[in-house]
Structures are given as C-alpha cells and as structure tokens.
Amino acid sequence: MKKPDSLRAHLLAAIPQLRRSPDQLLIFIDQGSARSTAARGLSFEYRYTLNLMLTDFAGSPDAVFIPLLAWLGVHQHELLASFEQNAEGIGFEVDVIDAGKVDLSITLPLTERVIVKGQPGGQLLVEYPQEQQLEPFLPAGTWQLYSGAELLAEWQSTEQEGGDLAMPHPPRRG
C-alpha cells in the first residue's frame, strides 16, 4: 500500500509542528479488505480505513485539514466530490489534553488498485496505477461539439471552479 506513506510525507512537509516532531503523527490501517473480480488475472483493490492520529497537537485543525483535503484532491478525489455519496467521508475525533493541546484522530476510507500483469518466463509484474485526475472545466466562451464533420451541439460556458474526471473516450462500435 502506497497511500499511507504518501500522506505521511505530505503532512510532514506541510505542517511545521509535525516537521519538528514527526513522532506526533501516527498512522494505522483498520478494517482492510482486498477485493477482486472473477476477471482473468490477479489484479485487485485494497479497501481500508486509514486512521491518522496527531498526538499532543497544539496547532489549528485547519493546519491539518486543508493540506489533507489538498492531498485527497489528488489521491482520493471521490471523497470530495459528493456530499450524498460520501455522507460519512472524513471522520474525526478530538481528545482535549489541556487548553493548548489535543489528540486528533482522523479516519479516511481509502482504496488502492493493484495491477498484476503476467510476464514472459512465468514472472508477475505488480503496478500501482495513479488515480485519475480531474481536468479543469472548459474556459469561458463558445463551445461546439462535433462528431466527425457533424455539429452536435453548441453552447456558451462561463468560467467555473472545480474539475471534471479525465476519462478516455469509449471505443466506437460498428
């Protein structure tokens, strides 16, 4: 699993208190499972709850959550995409130690794909594909949609914030 180490490195780089005291950041993996389909091959997906624990944390919760959201936008963006689909999303609990320190526990439901490819000579190659990234919405202006030379639609768009999932076009049939 690659995401726990990636998130640890991101938070240690982003949060000065953790950079000074990296032992204050603990990471656990709970409720893990490996899911596979009956498709040919040994590829599968890890599903687990990542539990981040910041002990004796004296900073603002915003100093943790905003870099965390930035990391999720790249590595698990579906947690940010829809309130309805991810009603439980990012969970947290706080134990107040004193007026200036807390123990902060954050839970994240994460997934990671593992692609296993057969190689010549009976070897297996394991790959960890990157998450598909969001592309910016279309810039403001007039847009026309064509299929070959045929104009299918035309519209005006305004500047938008956010993104759209970068997906390859499905192959044409027939």
Image (spheres, rainbow, N blue to C red):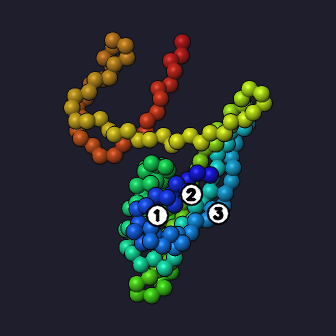
Q: Residues within 10 Å of mark 3 (few under 14, many from 20)?
A: some
Residue drawn at point x = 46 percent, y = 58 percent: 10
- Of the residues shown, which amino acid type is indicated by label 1? Leu
Tell me which corner region of the image, top left, top right, bottom left or bottom right, holds residue 160: top left
Instruction: Tell me whether the residue at label 1 lies in contact with that at label 2, contact meaning CB atoms closer than 8 angstroms.
Output: no
Residue drawn at point x = 67 percent, y = 42 percent: 44
- Of the residues shown, which amino acid type is indicated by label 2? Pro
Q: Position of residue 88 (x, y in %)?
A: 51, 61
Query: From the viewer's perspective, is 170 left or right of 119?
Result: left
Instruction: Tell me whether the residue at label 1 lies in contact with that at label 3, contact meaning CB atoms closer than 8 angstroms.
Output: no
Q: Earlier in the sequence, mark 1 or mark 2?
A: 2
Residue projecting furthest to the right? 122
SS under mark 1:
helix
SS under mark 3:
strand
Question: Badge 1 is on which residue?
Answer: 12
Q: Find the distance from the CA under tag 1 to the CA under tag 3.
A: 21 Å
SS under mark 2:
helix
Residue drawn at point x = 54 percent, y = 12 percent: 174
* Residue 30 badge: 3
Question: Badge 2 is on which residue?
Answer: 4
